[in-house]
């Protein structure tokens, strides 16, 4: 699947509506993690350098169709201004005469950010009238908001159906990197799947199970897999209604000759809280009153050994309750290990909000081949689903000789 991108566009002098994903965490009116803003910079710069008129649009949080002052995009515009080294004005509203006026005054090579699109319920409803108004601002549409591509909203689908649509450079990179996992990964190909729930990851596991050579299972979801293999997990987080799903994955793996690595030892704690009493035990003898909070040392050696020959690794979901540092050892060790593998030439792709946060905490993000900016979107992509925000962008026309 090769999409039309801004490389196929001569944007000079054109008004370009750029849907970006500036849905970033804020605290005290400041952006606390600007990675999504930074990820959109190459597209914004490319368009500005071509003397396009750049109209940026994003959502932030869940204002549910009402203006919420705490979800205004001003802090985002301030951070973006710093990153671009020029002032980025933000409108008071995505609609209205003031906004139209500000848009009219933009000159080639200038940019502006529309206020939070979700202050209007019509955005999430993909309202045709709203989409038409947004489309009236521009000559062409660019989607660089991979993290929102799984949503069929006015700014991700509606506007793209009206204007000539192109993928931005971030969108292109996300599609290329994630497609590579599904289509022609260099082998051996390993998936590390952790995080809390089987329920959240089951579709990804189903889709990947006959594409990978190896699956490492950790995190809370490993508990349900342990239950499926006849272990007891004490008072660990577990999903009894997903034991059948876990069993089906184990069977499918066996049929496909895919190796599954489950924890052989685990860190257990009296309570899943900071400072709780904890120890490491083999999975065959877990006491009833303890909770699994991390993978153990032996599991970590087994995981490293299994991963070592891999040429491609996809990782989603931390291996333990990493928010509590003493229960984050497994996640930290494997993060360092895959970073070294990436250094040595393996393709390492990380997806998922908490997984990415864990890797950023350790300052390892730049070592990885690709860190997906889409949590839900990257999972849906790897489930093999068609994302509406991608589907609506036309395929690239083959070059005419
Ligand atoms: P991602 O955001 O990377 O997709 P998830 O949201 O699926 O990851 O999972 C992250 C959460 O899983 C974290 O909050 C972490 O505390 C939790 N988790 C990991 N291991 C366990 C465990 N053994 N028991 C309970 N929760 C766990
Ligand atoms: Mg998460």
Image: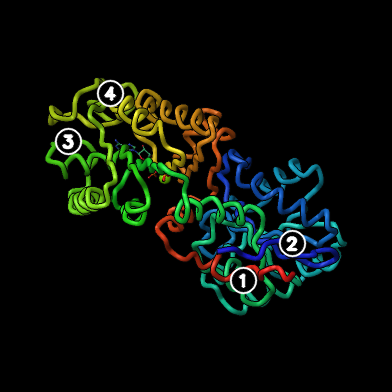
Residue at 76% over, 57% down: 112
Quarter of the figure that contains the N terminus: bottom right
Residue at 48% over, 42% down: 350
Whole-angstrom CA distance, mark 1 to mark 4, is: 49 Å
Nearer to us: label 2 or label 1: 1
Marks 3,1: beta carbons within 8 A: no
Residue 9 in which image quadrant: bottom right
Q: Nearer the viewer, residue 341 or 381?
A: 341
Q: Which residue is mark 4?
A: 298
| Marked residue nearer the N-terminal end (4 or 3) | 3
Q: Nearer the viewer, residue 165 or 130?
A: 165
Q: Which residue is mark 1?
A: 394
Q: Which residue is mark 3?
A: 233
The numbered dot on residue 131 is none
The residue tagged with tag 3: helix, strand or loop? loop
Left or right? Give the position of 235 relative to 350. Answer: left
Whole-angstrom CA distance, mark 2 to mark 4, is: 53 Å
Residue at the farthest front position: 401
Marks 4,3: beta carbons within 8 A: no
The residue tagged with tag 2: helix, strand or loop? strand
Q: Which residue is mark 2?
A: 55
Find out if the beta carbon at label 2 lies less than 8 Å from the nearest ligand 1 atom. no
Q: Residues within 10 Å of mark 1 (few under 14, many from 20)?
A: some
Q: Residues within 10 Å of mark 2 (few under 14, many from 20)?
A: many
Residue at 74% over, 69% down: 401
The residue tagged with tag 1: helix, strand or loop? loop
Q: Position of residue 392 (x, y in %)?
A: 57, 71
| Marked residue nearer the N-terminal end (1 or 4) | 4
């Amino acid at each position: 699947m090769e999409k039309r991108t801004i490389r196929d566009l001569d944007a000079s002098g054109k008004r370009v509506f750029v849907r970006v994903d500036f849905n970033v965490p804020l605290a005290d009116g400041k952006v606390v993690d600007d990675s999504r803003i930074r990820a959109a910079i190459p597209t914004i710069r490319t368009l500005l350098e071509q003397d396009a008129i750049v109209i940026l649009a994003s959502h932030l949080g869940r204002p549910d169709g009402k203006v919420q002052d705490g979800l205004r995009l001003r802090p985002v515009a301030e951070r973006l201004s710093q990153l671009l080294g020029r002032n980025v004005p933000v409108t008071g509203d995505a609609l209205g005469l003031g906004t139209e006026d500000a848009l009219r005054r933009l000159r080639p090579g200038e940019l502006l950010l529309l206020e939070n699109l979700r202050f209007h319920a019509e955005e999430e409803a993909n309202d045709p009238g709203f989409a038409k108004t947004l489309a009236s601002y521009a000559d062409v549409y660019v989607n660089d908001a991979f993290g929102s591509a799984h949503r069929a909203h006015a700014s991700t689908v509606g506007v793209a159906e009206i204007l000539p649509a192109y993928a931005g450079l971030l969108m292109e990179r996300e599609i290329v990197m994630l497609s590579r996992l599904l289509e022609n990964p260099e082998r051996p190909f390993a998936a590390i799947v952790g995080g809390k729930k089987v329920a959240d990851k089951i579709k990804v596991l189903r889709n990947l199970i006959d594409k990978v050579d190896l699956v490492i299972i950790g995190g809370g979801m490993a508990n349900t897999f342990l239950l499926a293999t006849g272990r007891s997990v004490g008072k660990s987080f577990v999903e009894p209604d997903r034991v059948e799903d876990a069993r089906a994955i184990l069977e499918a793996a066996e049929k496909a000759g895919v190796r599954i690595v489950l924890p052989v030892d685990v860190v257990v704690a009296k309570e899943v809280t900071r400072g709780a009493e904890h120890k490491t035990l083999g999975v065959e003898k877990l006491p009833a009153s303890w909770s699994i909070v991390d993978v153990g040392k032996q599991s970590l050696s087994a995981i490293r050994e299994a991963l070592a020959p891999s040429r491609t690794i996809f990782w989603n979901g931390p291996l333990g309750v990493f928010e509590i540092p003493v229960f984050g050892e497994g996640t930290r060790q494997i993060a360092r290990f895959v970073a070294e593998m990436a250094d040595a030439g393996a393709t390492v792709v990380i997806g998922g909000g908490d997984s990415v946060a864990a890797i950023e905490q350790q300052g390892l993000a730049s070592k990885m081949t690709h860190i997906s900016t889409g949590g839900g979107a990257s999972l849906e992509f790897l489930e093999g689903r068609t994302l509406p925000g991608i589907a609506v962008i036309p395929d690239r026309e083959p070059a005419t000789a």
